[in-house]
């Protein structure tokens, strides 16, 4: 608890740049928590559903039951639903509709990531600006006769160092969050594309079996 109070006291010496830096840090934290919650709620793929799609010649009725259990907001459910609803159409049509849905899901997964990207760039620059302002304040206190206010000079240097450290810390946290979320987005879309290919292959297999049945008849 004492460490937290000491950190708050130190921030008070950081100058005016502390406030926009804290705003950037808060924005980055909100985005990271929101995206983490979105992945937890809407991007989870049950292992039973993955195994079903990987099974050769599975029954569409079994997939329907699995999708109903996912709920309407699940990204995998939305993607698989588009393929299921168009499975009676040619495979090229199904792939086109699935690609459109995947693009919409990609936009949903990437929404808000620009904030983290901006924070990664802006936070160190604001920290640098705070450093410059703090050093300027220190230099102003050095008069023609030399150092006239040692305490004021020390406060200016502290302002410069605190702003720099805070900007770098916020940028590092935002960078780690941005990299983690972009990697999670890529993994989700890759898995979606891979399983979508399995479903389209199943549609082609059904069409091939239906054509063979008509020829036999």
Image (cartoon, rainbow, N blue to C red):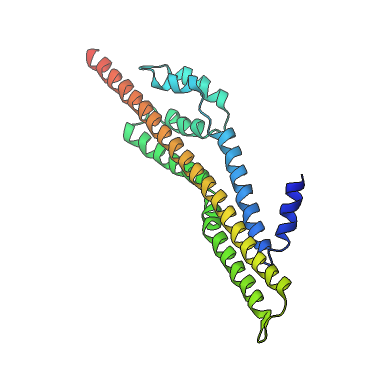
Residue 85 visible at all: yes
Residue furthest out toward the left: 215
Q: Is residue 23 placed above or below 66 in the rendered structure?
A: below
Left/right of residue 43 with respect to residue 130 in the rendered view: left
Name the residue: 51% across, 43% down. 181
The residue positioned 27% from the left and 15% from the top of the image is 213
Measured from the top left, where is residue 205 in percent x and y?
31, 21
Image position, residue 72 (x, y; %) = 57, 32
Note whether residue 73 is visible.
no
The residue depicted at 66 percent of the width and 80 percent of the height is: 140
Q: Position of residue 216 (x, y in %)?
A: 23, 13
| Drawn side of residue 57 relative to residue 162, left or right | left
Which residue is at a point 69% across and 66% down the rendered structure image? 15
Q: In this view, does 184 lie above or below 210?
A: below
Rendered-image quadrant of the N terminus: top right
As drawn, 27 above or below 62: below
For the residue pair 175 and 135, the one nearer the viewer reads as: 135
Relative to 202, does residue 5 appear above or below in the rendering?
A: below
Q: Quadrant of residue 38?
A: top right
Name the spot of residue 27 as percent of width and height, x first: 63, 53
Residue farthest to the top, as pictured: 217
- Where on the picture, by quarter, is residue 130? bottom right
- Judging depth in this view, the residue of 13 and 96 nearest the camera is 13
Q: Nearer the viewer, residue 141 or 106?
A: 141
Left or right of 29 in this view: 57 = left
Q: How many marks can you see?
A: 0
């Amino acid at each position: 608890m004492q460490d937290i109070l000491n950190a708050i006291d130190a921030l008070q010496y950081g100058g005016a740049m502390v406030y926009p830096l804290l705003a950037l840090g808060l924005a980055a934290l909100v985005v990271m928590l929101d995206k983490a919650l979105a992945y937890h709620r809407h991007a989870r793929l049950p292992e039973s559903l993955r195994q079903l799609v990987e099974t050769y010649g599975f029954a569409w009725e079994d997939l329907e039951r699995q999708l109903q259990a996912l709920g309407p907001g699940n990204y995998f459910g939305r993607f698989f639903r588009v393929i299921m609803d168009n499975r009676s159409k040619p495979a090229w049509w199904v792939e086109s509709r699935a690609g459109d849905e995947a693009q919409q899901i990609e936009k949903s997964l990437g929404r808000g990531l620009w904030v983290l990207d901006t924070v990664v760039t802006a936070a160190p620059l604001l920290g640098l600006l705070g450093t410059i302002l703090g050093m300027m304040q220190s230099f102003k206190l050095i008069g023609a006769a030399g150092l006239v206010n040692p305490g004021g000079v020390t406060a200016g240097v502290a302002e410069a160092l605190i702003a720099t450290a805070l900007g770098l810390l916020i940028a590092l946290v935002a960078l780690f969050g941005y990299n983690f979320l972009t990697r999670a987005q890529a993994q989700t879309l890759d898995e979606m594309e891979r399983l979508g290919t399995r479903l389209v292959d199943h549609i082609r297999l059904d069409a091939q079996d239906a054509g063979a049945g008509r020829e036999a008849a």
